Amino acid sequence: MTLLFYSAGAIALIATLSVIISTNVVHALVYLIISLLSVAVIFFALGAPFAAMLEAIVYAGAIMVLFLFVMMMLNLGQATEDEERAWMRPSLWIGPGVLSGILLLQFVSTMLTHDVTLAPVEVSVRDISLLLFGPWLLAVELASMLLLAGLIAAYHLAKK
Amino acid sequence: MDAIPYEHGLILAAVLFVCGLLGVLTRRNIVFVLMSLEIMLNACGLAFVVASARWQHAEGQIMYLMILTLAAAEVAVGLGLIIQMYRRFHTVDISVLNEMKG
C-alpha cells in the first residue's frame, strides 16, 4: 500500500505538471485524466474505495468527457496552439512561480510539525451511506439543488 | 499493512493545489484556467480524504462527495460560459474579457 501510494502520487504530480505546461488542450485533458485516475489509486491506498470509484466514474469519466465534448464543439485548431506557445514566456512564470513557491513552503512547514502515521482502515460504503442519509441529509438535498441550478444555468448559458 | 505518514498525503494535496494555482495565475487560455480550477478542487478533495483516513472517520469522504458535486456543477456552468464566449469573441483568450459592457 505504501508503494502504491508513493508511485501513484508521483504519477499524479508529473501528470498535473504536464497539464499546466501543455500547449495542446486535448493533450492537457488526457494528462488531467491520468492525474485524476492516479488520485483515485491514492484514495484506494488510503482505504477509501468508495471515493476512489466516484473519482474514476464522476471526475475522470463524466466531467472529463464533458470537457472533451466542449473541446470538440469549439474545434480549436493549430492557431490556438501557436498562440499558446507564444504566451508561454518564462518571464510570465517568475512572479506566479515565486508566490506559489512561498505558499507551498508555508504549507509544507506547517504540515511537517506533526508526526502521526496513517494505518489505513477501510471506510465501507455502508458507513458513508449511514452518515449521508442520516445527519447529512440536508447537505444531500442542498447538493441536489446545486446540481439542478447548475443544469438550468448550463442549459441557459449554452443556448444560442 | 504498512503505514503511510499522513503528512505525506497532505503534502501531496498541497503540491497539487499549488500546481493548480500556478496554472490559474499563468495561463491565458480560459480552458486551461478551468482545468486548473479542477486540479485545485481535486486537491482539496484529496486533503479531505487524507483527513478522513487520519481520524478514521467517514465524514471526510462526505465532504469529498460535496466537493465532487460542486465540481460537476461548476464545470457545467463554466463550459457553458466558454461556449458563449467563443461564440461572441471567437477566441479563448481571457484578456478579451476586460471590458464590462453588455
Image: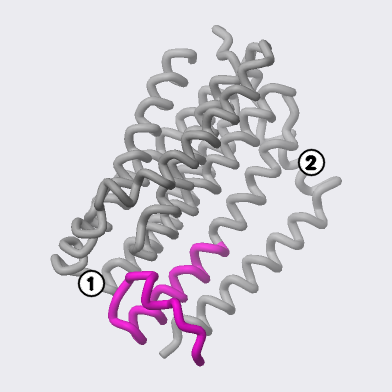
Q: Amino acid at mark 1?
A: Asn
Residue B35, placed above or below residue A7: below
The local crowd at label 1, few if under 14, some if 14 to 19, many if 20 or more residues have their Cα within 10 Å, is few
In whole angstroms, how far apart are the C-alphas of marks 2 and 1? 44 Å
In the rendered image, which quarter contains the C terminus of chain A? Answer: bottom left
Left or right: B27, with B48 as reference point: left
Q: Is residue A132 left or right of residue A50?
A: right
Q: Nearer the N terminus, badge 2 or badge 1?
A: 1
Q: Position of residue B58 (x, y in %)?
A: 73, 33
Residue B41: % across, % down: 55, 48
Residue B3: x and y, percent? Answer: 58, 10
Q: Residue at x 25, y 58 (%)?
A: A87
> In the rendered image, which quarter is residue A7 located in?
top left
Give the numbered dot on residue A75: 1
Q: Is residue B96 magenta?
A: yes
Is A3 in the magenta? no
Question: Residue A126, located in which quarter of the rendered image?
Answer: top right
Q: Nearer the viewer, residue B91 or B48?
A: B91
The chain letter for the residue carrying disc 2 is A
Q: Residues within 10 Å of mark 2 (few under 14, many from 20)?
A: some
Name the residue carrying label 2.
A131
* Picture quadrant where residue A141 is located: bottom right
Q: Which residue is found at the position 49% from the left and 42% from the top?
A: A99
Describe the element under mark 2 as helix, strand or loop: helix
Check chain identity for marks 2 and 1: say if they share one. Answer: yes
